[in-house]
Each structure stands twice: as structure tokens, then as C-alpha cells.
Image: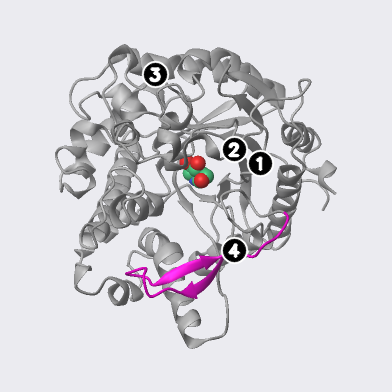
């Protein structure tokens, strides 16, 4: 098979806080990433999302860029605190209108909107009430989802409740490197469970609304391979796999947490009511998978509670994030989901890589051969999974454009489109041209 299946969806992804800028404009409330990046020492160079890609003001020309790239779909997230400045209660019409204009323009231009409800920017007002630790947050989230569904679910074909709950918890509640910056062993499993309950509550609202499109969730997955055959490394790899890959997916698709979670968290792991797991595991229309790398894993005595560390071999295509370039891992990941959880529609909702692009374009060009190769190999890895029977329905490049890489600030460039952050000049990179050709030829141009 040289081309991808008929109807395969080609898109690119972003998230609100990473690109929009103007986080408090038009009556928006603060969110935890605004507060976090404005706290000293929390992000590289003190970078914040105050301006980012200025997409809040440049959205119209950004939609034209998507058109130029030939995108069939655009995955983006809604900023909860733009729509509900206090996180619940009062709706901020101007915030909702920003997304209404975007959705309608995308549809006019023939680009399918793919909305993620939560890409980590919890309203600060809710964090002040305990955030993901508060037992009421599932209903707060469902109420927010309801506002979004009422506004857009009639015409938005794809919805995801959460983006990468693993990162939100591991970074935000266990290691403190992401907002809200907590490092607390007892909080992490509670935040994880409440995120999943919120997901379940939003899915219930979507089903109750009778909307005819698709709703799912986006998780980040990666194969874990031992860095050596020492028993310590092998055991650390197994724990890392449970914690990273199985924790969320088992709850979502098997209705239980893996037994290994108790071994990892010890007394910090609560017993959860069966009714919660039933709510969490309600059927979904698709699974979104974000894939970047595999993890060669070794034991690390200093990294409780999983005691694992990533080894990244020196390789010319190693990403500037330090991640190993490993396209075979994408095929393995897709096959693993199919084998463990059964056949289901899947999308690669993020894939790509950070590479050392220059801060400015030269003569209107940005050549990024490593990223071109990254996309080529990862798309071929998708094709291989398709050939092996995975029901893969689409692929979204991360990212449409260079943006704020969370606490790494603007130091990591992932875009198909280069952003000169001093001028906001956009330049389609060679990888953007490569991706456009892959879309145009349904993948025939890959090899
Ligand atoms: O930038 C992030 C995105 O927000 C979530 N997935 C991984 C990307 C790269 O780290």
C-alpha cells in the first residue's frame, strides 16, 4: 500500500496557552499557566504566554496558513478561563465568541475543527479551590464542557476531553515542573483520578446532548525498553510502563487500574469506588495518541516513586528536548493499544519533533531536514501500523507553528511554520512543505 486509506485525516495541532497570547483579554480569567510562568524561576528565561504567537489577534491569517499547508483538520484547545473566567458560573461571551469566530472560519475554509477541552490551563480561580484535588471538579469540568458543547457541538466533528492527563499530573502534582507546581506523592494519584472522572462526566454530557459527532480523549504513550538487562533496569522499565502507558488507558478501556499502581505509590494509592471506574470507562468514539519517542529506561534511586530515568543515546537526529528519534516506537505503540484494548478508531493527535531551527528565516526559508526526516519516518511508521490492521484514522502534526513549550519557554521549536518571536513573522518551513506534499498525495510522496 503506497497511499493512506481514503478519508484518512491530515491535520496539525496547537493548544491555547501555547499560541494565543493575550491571556487576560476581553474579560478572560487567569489560568494556572499564567500564574506559573509569572512566578520567578518557573520557566526558561522567564518566558510566558503573554504574547506567545499572538494567535488571539492573528487567528485569521493563521487560518490562511493552515489552508496554505493543505490541512484538512486543525486540533486546538479552548481556554477554559476565557469562557468561564471564574472557572464556573458566569459565561464570558467575548471569550466564547473568539472560538465561535475561529470555528466558523475553519468550517468556511473547509478545515475540520478538532477541539480539546482541557490542555492544562485550569482557571486560577478553581486552583484556588484545590484544582484537580477538589472532589467537585468533575462537575465543574462537565459544566464547562456543556457550555462548549452547546456552542459548538452541532458543527465540530471531533472533541477530546483531556490532553495528556499523565503530563498534567506527573509535571503538575508529582514533580512540580508544570503548573500548578506541586510535588506531592499523595496528591498525584488523586489528581489523576479526578481528571479521569472529569473526562467521564464530560462524555456523559456529550452523550446526553445527543450530539452526532465523535468524542474521545488524548493520551501520550511511548514504549519503555530497558537500557540494560540488569534486574534493576528491567524492573524500573516495567514500573515505568505501568505508570506511563497503562495507568490511564487501563482505567479508560478496562475499567480498572493496573495492579502495579499500588506497588508504585504504596500507601499513597487510594482504593477507588467501582462506580468511579464505570464512569471513567464509558465507551469512546476514538483514542487520540500523542507519540514523540520511546524511553530507554534505567533504574534511578533518586526518582521516587517510579525510580526510573530516561537514557537518550547520542544520535544526529536526537531532538533538542533530548528525546530519542525512534519511529519504530510509533508502530509498536499503535499495535500495543490494539492488542491490549482491542480494535478501536485511533488518531495520532500529536507527533513531530523539536530541532535546532534558527530564530529568523533566511531569504524567506527555514530548512529543517531533521524534522522532514522525522515526519517521513513517523508517517511510514503509521503506514506500517495500518498495514498490520490498526484502525488509524488520521495524523496531526505537532505543531502547526513554533510556540511556548511550557516551562521550556520558547527554547524548543516544534512548528511546521517558523515563528520569529521578535516580529511574529511566520514562515512555512521545509517540513511544512514536505507535509503539504504528503497530504496532497495521500502519503504517496513519502517513499
Ligand atoms: O508542547 C507539547 C504539547 O502541549 C503536549 N504534547 C507534547 C508537546 C511537546 O512537548
| Residues at marks 1 and 3 touching, judged by CB atoms closer than 8 Å | no
Residue 266, horizontal then vertical, whole percent? 24, 74
Residue at disc 3, secondary structure: loop
Nearer to us in this view, 217 or 321: 321
The image's mark for residue 413 is 2
Residues at marks 2 and 3, CA–CA distance in whole angstroms = 21 Å
Residue 32: image location, x then y, percent: 29, 36
Tell me the distance, in whole angstroms, between the alpha carbons under discs 2 and 1. 7 Å
Callout 4 environment at 10 Å: few (<14), some (14 to 19), or many (20+)?
some
- Cα distance, mark 4 to mark 3? 36 Å
Q: In the shown orientation, is residue 169 left or right of residue 365?
A: left
Q: Where does label 3 land, which residue?
A: 22
Q: Earlier in the sequence, mark 4 or mark 3?
A: 3
The magenta region covers 295-316
Tell me the tag on residue 356: 1
Task: Report the residue marked by disc 4.
Answer: 312
Point out the tag, 2 or 1, that comes first from the N-terminus: 1
Q: Is residue 132 left or right of residue 329?
A: left
Mark 2 or 1, closer to the camera: 1
Q: Secondary structure at mark 1?
A: loop
Left/right placement of residue 46 relative to residue 393 reads left
Amino acid at each position: 500500500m503506497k497511499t493512506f486509506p481514503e478519508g484518512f485525516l491530515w491535520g496539525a495541532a496547537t493548544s491555547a496557552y501555547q499560541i494565543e497570547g493575550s491571556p487576560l483579554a476581553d474579560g478572560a480569567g487567569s489560568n494556572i499557566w499564567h500564574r506559573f510562568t509569572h512566578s520567578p524561576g518557573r520557566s526558561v528565561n522567564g518566558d510566558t504566554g503573554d504574547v506567545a504567537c499572538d494567535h488571539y489577534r492573528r487567528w485569521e491569517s493563521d487560518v490562511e496558513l493552515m489552508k496554505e499547508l493543505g490541512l484538512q483538520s486543525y486540533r486546538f484547545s479552548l481556554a477554559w478561563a476565557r469562557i468561564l473566567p471564574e472557572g464556573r458560573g458566569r459565561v464570558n461571551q467575548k471569550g466564547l465568541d473568539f472560538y465561535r469566530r475561529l470555528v466558523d472560519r475553519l468550517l468556511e475554509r473547509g478545515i475540520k475543527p478538532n477541539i480539546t477541552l482541557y490542555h492544562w490551563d485550569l482557571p486560577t480561580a478553581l486552583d484556588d479551590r484545590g484544582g484537580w484535588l477538589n472532589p467537585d471538579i468533575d462537575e465543574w469540568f462537565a459544566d464547562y464542557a456543556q457550555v462548549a458543547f452547546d456552542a459548538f457541538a452541532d458543527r465540530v466533528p471531533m472533541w477530546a476531553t483531556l490532553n495528556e492527563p499523565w503530563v498534567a499530573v506527573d509535571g503538575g502534582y508529582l514533580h512540580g515542573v508544570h503548573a500548578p507546581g506541586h510535588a506531592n506523592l499523595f496528591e498525584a494519584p488523586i489528581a489523576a483520578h479526578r481528571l479521569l472522572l472529569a473526562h467521564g462526566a464530560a462524555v456523559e454530557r456529550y452523550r446526553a446532548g445527543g450530539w452526532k459527532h465523535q468524542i474521545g480523549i488524548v493520551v501520550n504513550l511511548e514504549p519503555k525498553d530497558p537500557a540494560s538487562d540488569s534486574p534493576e533496569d528491567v524492573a524500573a522499565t516495567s514500573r515505568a510502563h505501568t505508570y506511563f502507558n497503562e495507568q490511564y488507558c487501563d482505567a479508560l478501556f478496562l475499567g480498572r487500574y493496573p495492579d502495579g499502581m499500588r506497588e508504585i505509590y504504596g500507601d499513597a494509592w487510594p482504593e477507588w469506588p467501582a462506580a468511579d471506574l464505570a464512569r471513567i470507562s464509558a465507551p469512546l468514539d476514538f483514542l487520540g495518541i500523542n507519540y514523540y519517542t520511546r524511553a530507554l529506561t534505567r533504574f534511578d534511586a533518586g526518582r521516587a516513586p517510579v525510580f526510573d530515568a530516561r537514557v537518550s543515546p547520542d544520535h544526529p537526529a536526537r531532538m533538542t528536548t533530548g528525546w530519542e528519534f525512534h519511529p519504530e516506537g510509533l508502530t509498536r505503540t499503535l499495535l500495543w493499544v490494539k492488542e491490549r484494548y482491542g480494535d478501536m478508531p485511533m488518531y495520532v493527535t500529536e507527533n513531530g519533533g523539536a530541532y535546532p531551527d534558527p530564530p529568523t528565516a533566511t531569504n524567506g526559508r527555514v530548512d529543517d531536514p531533521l524534522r522532514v526526516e522525522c515526519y517521513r519516518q513517523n508517517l511510514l511508521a503509521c503506514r506500517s501500523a495500518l498495514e498490520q490492521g490498526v484502525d488509524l484514522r488520521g495524523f496531526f502534526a505537532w505543531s502547526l507553528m513554533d510556540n511556548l513549550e511550557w516551562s521550556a519557554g520558547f527554547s524548543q521549536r516544534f512548528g511546521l511554520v517558523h515563528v520569529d518571536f521578535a516580529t511574529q513573522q511566520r514562515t512555512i518551513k521545509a517540513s511544512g512543505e514536505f507535509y503539504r506534499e504528503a497530504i496532497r498525495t495521500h502519503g504517496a510522496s513519502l517513499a
